[in-house]
Image: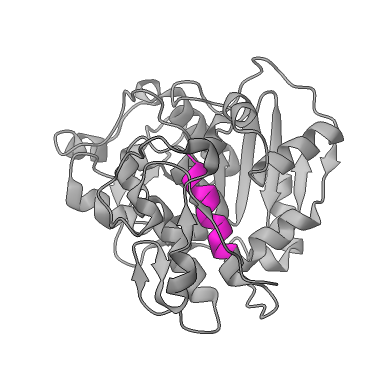
Amino acid sequence: KLTTAWLSECVSAHEGCGGDESSVLPKRVIHVGSEDVNPRLIETIDGQRGRYVTLSYCWGRSISFITTTANFTTHLTGFSTSELPKTIEDAVRFCRHMKIDYLWADCICIIQDDLDDWREESSKMASIYQNSTLTLSATCAESVEKGCFSDEGRIICHRCLFGDLASELRNSGREEDLAQRYPVLTRGWIFQERLLSRRTVHCARGDLFWECLVAKKCECTGDFFDPNERAERQPFHSWRDITIDYNAMWMALVEVHTSRRLTKATDKLVAFSGVAKVFEALLHFPLGEYYAGLWRAYLCLHLCWGRPPRLMPAVAMRTGEPSWSWSSIAEPCSYIIYLPT
């Protein structure tokens, strides 16, 4: 009921967040079914529209249920919720409760052993997360087997604690604290998922947190408004503000993205590609070609990256990308220069 109320308020009162109308569905989605009808994977018709939820979560060390070329046809016929990892099962039940027919979860909606399919669908992450009705984030679960909703180690939420979460959602918390309390927020793929989502419901221990472009809400204490957070996120969705130093913003985004963890270091560019697409579309001037994470218009400045001093002088692990790009090392990077604001 609480999430339904939050969504209803956002749709009716937050002009900047967009409405609740249906949008073009991704290539594949899970039809969540009902208590009497099993969920199933469906391939959508080109241009088919509907409301859907995107899921943001950690896979963990292994995952027991994925779509492959071998079981793809079987998944189209359906599967029981008892077969699903706990996080996916919780997300299916969440969609049913919200009366939203479709769910998008990468482990099921992308054919995991088909490299061409993975590349095609991974390149669409920006539109998939931007167009969903909302994103459900298993923020405190370190693996897909843990589930979205848990009272384990319940944190009694006061405004000061929610302020702490808001700060860490802006990626300013200490890395070890972030990993322990909110493991989802340490992941490279999830960094862009959160930036691109219009609305996110964070499942914390014993509490729910709502985050959209206009407001923050907490299950325990109600509204929490953070103007700094709002200013950070809105340019990714609707603003074309010539007073914003987009170049400095880009470099800051790269620094945060490279500090996040990736299971495969070679995913460093593709896990940031959605941010790059939206960033380019929002600007009022051309950036030129995109060279492995660097824009031609600012090439001289964007080449001024390096490894943080704390990582020197150890040899960096290489990813196979061009050596002049920050994507060439499987480590954080920092920029030496920022444009004056």
Count of residue discs: 0
Out of 47 and 307, give the one closest to the viewer: 307
**Outermost front residue:** 313
Out of 135 and 113, give the one closest to the viewer: 113
What residue lies at 36% left-to-right and 34% top-to-bottom? 263
| Colour scheme of the rendered structure | one colour
State which quarter of the image contains the N terminus.
top right
- Residue 196 in view in this figure: no
Q: Quadrant of residue 40?
A: top left
Q: Is residue 255 magenta?
A: yes
Please state the horizontal and vertical placement of residue 168, each as a whole percent of the image. Answer: 68, 39
What residue lies at 43% left-to-right and 59% top-to-bottom? 274
**Outermost bottom residue:** 285
Please state the horizontal and vertical placement of residue 236, each as a whole percent of the image. Answer: 58, 65
What residue lies at 46% left-to-right and 35% top-to-bottom? 34
State which quarter of the image contains the C terminus.
bottom right
Vertical comparison of 274 with 138: above or below: below
Q: Is residue 207 magenta?
A: no
**Outermost left residue:** 70
Out of 269 and 13, give the one closest to the viewer: 269
**Outermost top residue:** 152
Q: Quadrant of residue 158?
A: top right
Please state the horizontal and vertical placement of residue 69, each as a whole percent of the image. Answer: 15, 39
Horizontal side of residue 123 vs 311, given as left or right = left
Most prominent secondary structure in the magenta stretch?
helix
Vertical comparison of 35 with 133: above or below: above
Please state the horizontal and vertical placement of residue 143, each as a whole percent of the image. Answer: 45, 25
What residue lies at 48% left-to-right and 75% top-to-bottom? 281
Vertical comparison of 241 with 95: above or below: below
- Residue 295 in view in this figure: yes
Horizontal side of residue 303 vs 217, given as left or right = left
Q: Which residues are magenta?
A: 249-260
